[in-house]
Image: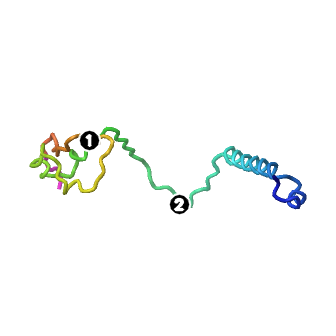
């Protein structure tokens, strides 16, 4: 079914031809932008960084063993996590099958270093 004979005669094509042509044009523009390459503009400020240290810590230490000492964890170790602490927090996929949620303290003794 055509929209209107007047529109078809004005643009010289039917709806199917119009949509096919539009799709081809959009595809050509996308291909042109992919083939263009990286034409990034020059920076207006000179870079100051000389070196970068990138730390990818996949499987790094847990938050319990870092810098934030929590003495309450040692007192609560092995006991069930109170509902007041958990609140309305959803369980993750790793903890959804657990029957209990015990509090776990760090395995290492905390000692302060530095100022």
Q: Provide residue 52's location: percent of width, then percent of height.
A: 41, 47
> What x and y, as percent, mark residue 98?
24, 40
* Residue drawn at x 78%, y 47% as measured from the top left: 20
Report which residue position mark 1 lands on: 61
69 displayed left or right of 16: left
In depth, the one of 56 and 107 nearer the eye is: 107
**SS class of the residue under badge 1?**
loop
Closer to us: 47 or 80:
80
- Label 2: which residue? 45
Identity of the residue drawn at 17% across and 56% down: 115
User: Does 112 appear in magenta?
Assistant: yes
The answer to which of marks 1 and 2 sits earlier in the sequence is: 2
> How is the protein colored in the picture?
rainbow
Q: Is residue 33 left or right of residue 82?
A: right
Outermost residue toward the front in this view: 1
Q: Name the residue located 82 percent from the left edge and 49 percent from the top edge.
A: 17
Residue 40's disc number:
none
Q: Main secondary structure of the magenta part?
A: loop
Which range of residues does the magenta coloring cover?
Answer: 110-115
**Spatial separation of the CA atoms under disc 1 and disc 2:** 38 Å
55 left or right of 28?
left
* Secondary structure of the residue carrying numbered label 2: loop
């Amino acid at each position: 079914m055509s929209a209107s004979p007047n529109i078809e005669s004005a643009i010289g094509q039917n709806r199917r031809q119009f949509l096919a042509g539009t799709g081809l044009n959009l595809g050509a523009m996308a291909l042109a932008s992919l083939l263009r390459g990286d034409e990034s503009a020059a920076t207006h400020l000179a870079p100051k960084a000389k070196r970068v240290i990138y730390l990818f810590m996949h499987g790094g230490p847990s938050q319990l063993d870092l810098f934030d000492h929590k003495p309450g964890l040692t007192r609560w170790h092995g006991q069930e996590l109170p509902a007041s602490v958990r609140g309305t927090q959803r369980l993750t996929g790793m903890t959804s099958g657990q029957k209990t949620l015990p509090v776990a303290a760090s395995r290492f003794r905390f000692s302060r270093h530095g100022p």
